[in-house]
Amino acid sequence: MTAGTEQTAAVPAVSARWFLLNFVALSLLAGVGVGIAKVSTALYALHLHASNAEIGLISAAQMVGMLFMSIPVGLLLDQVGAMKMYLSGTLIAALLYCLTPSIGEAWFLLVCTALVSFCMPCRFIALNAVFMQQLNQVGETKAGWFRGCHMIGMFLLGPAIATALIAALPFGWVYQLIGISFVLTLLIAPRVLRIYQPKAVSHPGGAIWPRVRSQFGLLRRHRALQQCGAIEVLVNSSMMFYTAFIVAIAVRDFGLSASAAASLITSQGLSFILALMLLGGVAQKLGRRAVYRLGFTGGALSLCLLGLAPWGAALWVGGLLLGLALGWLQAANMTRVAQLGEDLGQGQVAGLMALIGPLGGFSGTVIGGLFGQLIHLQWLFLFFAGCFVLAAGFSLRPAASTETEHELNYQGVSQ
């Protein structure tokens, strides 16, 4: 076997199960750490008597690093390697979490949260790149496992653990344990990330920035990609608004306990994950237009229920329905994005989606933080319901003639 062949060879088929088991463990553990941090940050902000504006900014700060770092990290990955990228992001994030409770002020929580967000792309993109490279070995039917496993840790296990920790320990100790949980992932990471075989780097150094700018030209030229991006923004903005503010709404307006409020995030996350992992095949059979009609209708109805809920039980129903609608839309959108990537380039499309998704999440939290000072916070769910109705008209417009053959075939299922 030549040196060039060794550089591009994937892991042997006999080790695919070994890789998948280690990857699932690593993804779950990484998601648990993030989930504990998200819930702890929301409750710590309330503990510090943060205003609605401060809560919104703190939640938005969790996404700001993804906005600036997603595309650069993706382009740099082959230069520094997946393991080094993950290691640096993990160690810096762990240190910042340990420092977070050292000053009990909302502004310091905001600063630390923003700095941590710049580390997260190093972890997430490194894991995603390794998994996509090994997808032929583990099987394409498991393409959703990375996001699904990460979200199980982040939305199901993490919030439950965070609630138990906060009930038993002061916030200072909770944040130390968050830092430790990040470091613990390094016990598994080498088994997974050292498998990654970087491609030859043809544009080192400063050439990365023209390549970053070129990604946006791709978005301008393709209406189908714009439609996918619009749906990604809508899904992530409504998801992040719910995650960021449902705890405050449940505790302040409905008098729920901290554990009950955290369970609203858990139940909504569970319904989202189930829809994401189980409904993709159903969505493809129904066709894109029917799927989007159902998804937008369900999303609008669930958001109206959340915005007008007269009692706490309605929040659980609304959250469950919202998770199903958002997961349904995301499953269909992921299929469409993958089809576009076959003609436009998977790397380019994935890089754009890695930026657009956090941009939606960032906008959702900023909207809540700014307008939550002017009107009742719960009523902002009605604003997102209106956005679902408007986006339906945009996404159902016929795509331009440049749309790929795969995309036309996908539309034809329902026509």
Image: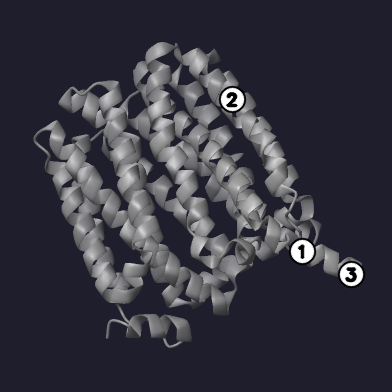
Q: Is residue 110 above or below residue 394?
A: above
| Residue 104 shows in this picture | no
Label 2 sits on a secondary structure element that is helix
- Is residue 7 found left or right of 300 in the rendered image? right
Q: Position of residue 304 (x, y in %)?
A: 15, 49
Question: Residue tagged by mark 3?
Answer: 1
- Of all residues, the one furthest to the right in this rendering is 2
Question: Residue tagged by mark 1?
Answer: 199
Quarter of the rendering containing residue 255: top left
Q: Nearer the viewer, residue 302 or 328?
A: 328
* Disc on the earlier residue, 3 or 2: 3
Label 1 sits on a secondary structure element that is loop
Mark 1, mark 3: which one is toward the viewer?
3
- Of all residues, the one furthest to the front in this rendering is 14
Question: Residue tagged by mark 2?
Answer: 179
Q: Is residue 212 above or below residue 249?
A: below
Q: Is residue 72 above or below residue 176?
A: below
- Is residue 207 found left or right of 275 in the rendered image? right
Q: Quadrant of the C terminus?
A: bottom left
The amino acid type found where label 3 is placed reads Met
Mark 3, mark 2: which one is toward the viewer?
3
Q: Position of residue 402 (x, y in %)?
A: 47, 85
Q: Nearer the viewer, residue 36 or 119?
A: 36
The amino acid type found where label 1 is placed reads Lys
